[in-house]
Image (spheres, rainbow, N blue to C red):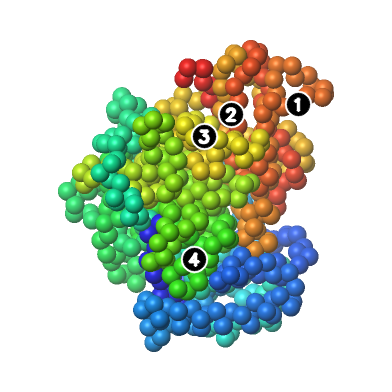
Amino acid sequence: MKKRTISVLLMICMIILSANGLSALAFNEIDSEEVILEPIQTEANDNIYNKIHFYFGEDAYQTIDTFDELTKAVNNTAKKVNETAAAMSRSGNVSEESFTNEICVTVEFASDYMQTKEFLAFSEERNHLDSIDEVHEFRSRLNAFSKSYHEKMAKENIKDLSAFSYTKVSPIAYSPFVTMTMPVDNVNVSSLKSVAENTNVLEISLSYQSASYEPEFESQDAVESRSQSSVGPGDHLRAVNAYDRINADGLTGEGIRIGVYEADGVCDVNRSNLADIDITVGTHINGTTFPVDLHATKVTSILVEIAKDASYYVYSGYDLLGVEWFIDQGCDIVNMSVGDYNCASNGDGTYTNGNPGYCVYDAIIDYQIKTSYITVVVASGNQSSTNVTTAYNPDNQIGCPGYAYNAITVGGVKYDEGTGWIHDPRASYVSPTNIMKPNIAVPYTVYIDAFNDWSSGASYSAPVVTGCLALFMESHPYSMIFPEDMLSMVTSTAQKTADYSISVGANRYNDLKVGAGILNFEGMYNIAGYERKTITNSPRYTTHIDENIYLEAGQEIQIGVAWLVTAYSTTGGSVQNAVYVTDYNLYLYDPSYTPGGMNMAVATSQLSASNVEMLRYTATTTGWYKLTVSQWSDMAAGNTGDRMMMTYTIKSPTS
């Protein structure tokens, strides 16, 4: 990911103020009286300190457990902010005069939005939509209700933040999150403790580098490798089995609304290949325009070459903490060729290594996907061992929001003449072992016809997936409002890479570097079977899916199960302890299965804190196999009504 050095605290003010353009005074302008908020019943939190997270240098994702730890963290904050100011000044990236001592505080409130009768009615209604127009009309009503509801929630809960001496406050639309700016000297133990004690407050995150998403970069070795690249026009579509299907069916993306989220600018709408495309370009909250950017133009060009008749909505970074602008536009799918390698900067152009993973900005994306039914595709990131910019990523960490559970995170592969498609070492993949990231992979080097040139980077992999999924939505309109269907289908149809491996564990069938494998667009059209289930208040060990599937010896079955979650950790960002992810497990039993007997599954997927399960199994015996999805844990708080999608494909030995 291309990282541009940030004027840290100065940028934070821009980010927070512009997220929705609301300050404390602006709450008087919210017209949401038609929404009635019911009292929220939340479970008691035995340790209020676990709600508080500091994202500063080596303390990134620090778990706060006691009053003493909180005191130390607060005392250390001002020191780190000042150290950052000095380091940035020495680097020449920001002058001491332009540096401010304000930090970003993000608060998540408890929300019963997903338990309201209105949202539950919307959730049921989406099962009965058959056309693109019906989906867009549905989105309009859903988004209006959601925006009004969450604005009213922010208005009523802002009083709970009175202990903070903030200078500005802004709610993040379509979510229960609020951001504030405040001088670092105003951050004290008593105010943090006071806010954390409020049962309506779930999380408090403090940082001096917010989710200032920045574009992917082309590493120098990627640029140098162009002359050796065997990738030609259309090869990225052939690699994902989309080229023939697109041509045969005449798919163009007509009617689909695609969001393009960039960071350093927007596409050049006057460029010859984009001049006749339906493109809406956003502006800053203050009305100023975004600059034209080559990276944004290339990403949009890749999308347009795949889905030329779609409508495009392009926005540039620092104004958003989630995808709220794209929800405003009624988008069906959003491409995010942007990212942040870590939520904490050392202040000298390098990033803290060793602590990658889920953070508050991933949580915002997750909530918006789950409640707005919008599909989001995120680039995984790139490796960079040259410490010259904030793109420094020697550990090849996936960038934020690439850890968002509900997003489709895209890695990269390259073609080796002697082996076939294998993981490209420049594509990020580092991930905790119990969450499936990346989800899918496509060529890391893409030939952009409009530029008559090759471009390398996960930035250019992501729009290949986004464009293909937009075409799938065009031909299967129901999928436009089922992000969990997209997650399940890309998982169950993906093609193995030549270096595919499950050696990291018998119960994890996704490769740590390429996820389920290479996107298989044609495979999505030929799904062998699927089942969608709504999970209510079920106790642990409940079996939710129970199917018999006939397999011949030598056939391989590939299964993907996905569901949407609201996922945020109470232990400082540790994915292993994300408290809103219900644990469902996937099992496959051979024909000798007998109900109630001591049967061992021939293949299982048991990721303890992930919302995607997958397995691959080659049948050794011809007969009826039993496929089950069971609930291993109690249902996670707030996830009543999980909508689970299970899909599978069956391949012959020669396919």
Q: Residue type at mark 3?
A: Tyr
- Name the foreground residue: 514 vs 464: 514
For label 3, the crowd category at 10 Å Cα-Cα, with few meaning under 14, some 14 to 19 and many 20 or more, is many
Q: Earlier in the sequence, mark 2 or mark 3?
A: 3
Foreground mark, 1 or 3, reads 3
Residue position for label 1: 600
Apparent side of residue 625 relative to residue 469 in the rendered image (left or right): right
Nearest to N terminus: mark 1 or mark 4 = 4
Question: Residue type at mark 1?
Answer: Met
The amino acid type found where label 2 is placed reads Arg
Between disc 2 and disc 3, the foreground one is 3
Q: Which residue is mark 2?
A: 616
Asked if residue 452 can be seen in this view, the reply is yes
Q: Which mark is residue 351?
A: 4
**Image location of residue 28, percent across then percent down:** 50, 74
Picture residue at 75% right of the left edge, 46% below the top: 634
- Determine whether the residue tagged by mark 3 lies in a helix, strand or loop: loop
Task: Give the residue at x 54% y 62%.
Answer: 353
Cα distance, mark 4 to mark 3?
Answer: 30 Å
Identify the image quadrant of residue 67. Answer: bottom right
Measured from the top left, where is residue 79 in percent x and y?
56, 83
Front residue of this view, candidates 525 and 117: 525
